[in-house]
Structure formats: C-alpha cells, structure tokens
Image (tube, helix red, strand yellow):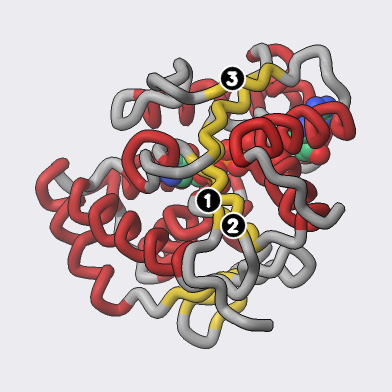
Amino acid sequence: MARHSFPILVAIDGPAGSGKSSVSRAVARRLGFAYLDTGAAYRALAWLVLDRNIDETALSDAAQADAVTALLKDFDYSIGTDPDEYFVTVGQADVTDAIRSPEVSAAVSAVARVPAVRQALTELFRSLAANVDRPGVVVEGRDITTIVAPEAEVRILLTASEEARMTRRSAEITTQSAETVAEQLRSRDRADSQVVDFMSAADGVITVDSTHLDFEQTIEAVIDVIHTRTKRAFNE
Ligand SMILES: Nc1ncnc2c1ncn2[C@@H]1O[C@H](COP(=O)(O)OP(=O)(O)O)[C@@H](O)[C@H]1O
Ligand SMILES: Nc1ccn([C@@H]2O[C@H](COP(=O)(O)OP(=O)(O)O)[C@@H](O)[C@H]2O)c(=O)n1
C-alpha cells in the first residue's frame, strides 16, 4: 500500500480499562487506518528492566532513572501497527503476551515517569505515526492528545466510571481476584496521573464516556467524532 504523506491522526487518551486499546483497534480496522498502542512501548521497556534483573525497588529515584535511561540504547523495539497483525518485540523476543503480566503492570509506572524515557518514546511514537501506510492512524495512550500529538485532527478522551473499568478489566484477568485487579488498576492510575493528566479533557478534546455504552456503541461514538471532526467519510 502507498504511504500517505499526511495520515489523519486520531489521538485517544484515557485511564486504564476505559477501552482505549480494544476500541481504537476496532475503529482502525473499520476505517482502514493503522493502530498505534503507545502503552505497549512503556510496558516493553518495563519488561526489559525485569528481564535484566534490575531491582528498581532497591534503587533511589535518581539511580532508577539512570538505570532505565541507560537501557534505552539497547531498546530494540518494534510493534505492529496493522490492527489485524498486532505484535510487540524487543530484539528477538516476542513480548506481545509477556508485557501484559501483573509483574510488568506493577513495574511500568516507575519506568514511565522517567523524563528521558518519555522524551525518547514520544519521538518514537511521532515517527511511527507519521510513517504508516494507511490514510490515517489511531494512536492511543495517556498523553497523545496533549504531548505526543496535540495538533491531531481528532482528539478524544475515552472515559468510563471507575466501577465499569474495574469490572471490564477483572473480566479479562482470570488469574487474579477482582479485588486485586481493581487495587492494582487504581494504584497504577494514581501513579500515572502524577505524570500526565488523562482524567480531564484538555481544550479541544472531545470526551466519550463509555460507562453506559456497550462495545459496539463506543466504537460508533468514536467513529462519529472522527467523521464530525474531519468532515470526511472513510471506507467502513
Ligand atoms: N464500552 C464497553 N463496554 C463493555 N466492555 C468494553 C467496552 N469498551 C471496552 N470494553 C472491554 O473492556 C476491557 C478493557 O478494555 P481495553 O481496551 O483493554 O482498555 P484500555 O486499553 O483502556 O486499558 C476489554 O475486555 C474490552 O473488550
Ligand atoms: N502514552 C502513554 C501510554 C502509556 N503510558 C504508561 O504505560 C502504562 C501501560 O499503558 P497501557 O495503555 O498499556 O495500559 P492499560 O490502560 O491498557 O492498562 C501506563 O500505566 C502508563 O504508565 C504512558 O505513560 N503514556
């Protein structure tokens, strides 16, 4: 497929379990767009920290930041941006499933708060999004509407009540109790929101609240915003 010089950028932020990944991927599939999951890169770097046996809890904040920053030069990361062929690799290792483990989820916020990490990954996301071979790209994370792509044509904050988010996530994770999943999600959101604000919509960002929408209705609500904002119809 030909590379489009200016893919339409759809930026989606929101807290854990709000539906960012699943909804973004489905929207991209329907519109023939690419899909970029930015949380996967933070998770993959956290996976590398654990794989190298770096015990972050034993280090001071500054030493932690240095250790993680030093890893960036070995971070041979790649991600599939085709919504039908999602994969995440670090070097030769396929980490698509490993980055969803509770250990990685527990370690990721500490990695994501290191400024040098955010800077490097933000550059990576801009370059990945600019080089997709589709007419548009849906990029989802925590700071896409505000930092990574504040100029995006479409900017959405996808929210849902805490209760709905916890229920949805614990239905997915069967290896831990619902209480454990909820507590981990809450504590990750708390840590993450000290670094970026993804709980309130920045100027010009449209909120889609999926608390009372099912999955299909949420996809349709997001596609409606895309059509309204771009004033264009894409092949559905
Ligand atoms: N509107 C919705 N109604 C019901 N379940 C949903 C809805 N949106 C997403 N889900 C489900 O909730 C779970 C969490 O969604 P996910 O996309 O992983 O969230 P996030 O990427 O924001 O953490 C998934 O199992 C997904 O299928
Ligand atoms: N744009 C982003 C995306 C993710 N992240 C970090 O990466 C972690 C994992 O993101 P994710 O999107 O995979 O998390 P879920 O919402 O899917 O649980 C978050 O908890 C943040 O610490 C970030 O800091 N900025």
The 10 Å Cα crowd at callout 2, few under 14, some 14 to 19, many 20 or more, is many
Q: Residue furthest left?
A: 62
Q: Residue at x 10, y 46 (%)?
A: 62
Label 3, label 2: how many angstroms apart (C-alpha)? Answer: 19 Å
Which of pointers 3 and 2 lies earlier in the amino acid sequence? 2
Viewer-proximal residue among 176 and 131: 131
Q: Callout 1: helix, strand or loop?
A: strand
Q: Are marks 1 and 2 in contact (CB under 8 Å)?
A: yes
**Which residue was labeled with disc 1?**
9
**Which residue was labeled with disc 2?**
137
Residue at disc 3, CB closer than 8 Å to ligand 1 = no
The 10 Å Cα crowd at callout 3, few under 14, some 14 to 19, many 20 or more, is some
Viewer-proximal residue among 199 and 93: 199
Q: How many marks?
A: 3
Q: Residue at x 59, y 19 (%)?
A: 207
The three-letter amino acid code for the residue at tag 3 is Thr
**Which residue was labeled with disc 3?**
207
